[in-house]
Amino acid sequence: MKKAYRVKKNSEFQEILKSGKSFANRELVIYYKEKPLQTHFRIGISVGKKIGNAVTRNRIKRYIRESFIQLEDDVLPELDLVIIARKPTINMDCKQIKKSLLHLLNKLNLLYK
């Protein structure tokens, strides 16, 4: 995933968490904020230390990034997103994480029809 598609700065993370809207399921929490003049969406991923060791956390981040690469054309472009992984993601593979993300994005109407 290109760096332009990522939320990296702590201040940007905090802004999305404070003033954005949120929704969750058992596996993931999604915070989003609309940015009207943006040409593509940006995502930030957070996987806490309670989830597991560094190898496990990085694997979950890779799966989430891969899911967004596959969904790139379907996600609305004027969004900043922060995805927070929960405990059940430890036992999930890439397809399951993508399914969970699709569930959240569909519920929030953040996908093209």
Image (spheres, rainbow, N blue to C red):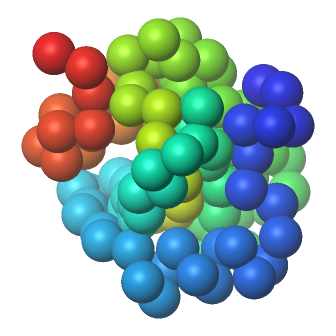
75 versus 19 height, above or below: above
Q: Splitting the image into 4 quarters, where does residue 20 fall? A: bottom left
Give the x, y percent position of residue 54. 85, 57
33 versus 69 height, above or below: below
Give the x, y percent position of residue 95. 43, 17
| Nearer-the-camera pick, 53 or 11 | 11
Position of 47 with respect to 57 (left or right) is left
Quadrant position of the C terminus in the picture: top left
Residue at the extreme front:
37
Count the marks.
0
Position of 69 with respect to 95 (left or right) is right
Give the x, y percent position of residue 1. 78, 25
Q: Splitting the image into 4 quarters, where does residue 39 fall? A: top right
Position of 111 with respect to 19 (left or right) is left
| Nearer-the-camera pick, 26 or 37 | 37
The answer to whether one can see residue 92 in this image is: no
Q: Splitting the image into 4 quarters, where does residue 65 fall? A: top right
Q: Residue visible at 58% across and 81% down? A: 15
The answer to whether one can see residue 108 in this image is: yes
Q: Residue visible at 66% across and 55% down? A: 44
Give the x, y percent position of residue 68. 55, 26
Q: Residue visible at 45% across and 50% down? A: 36
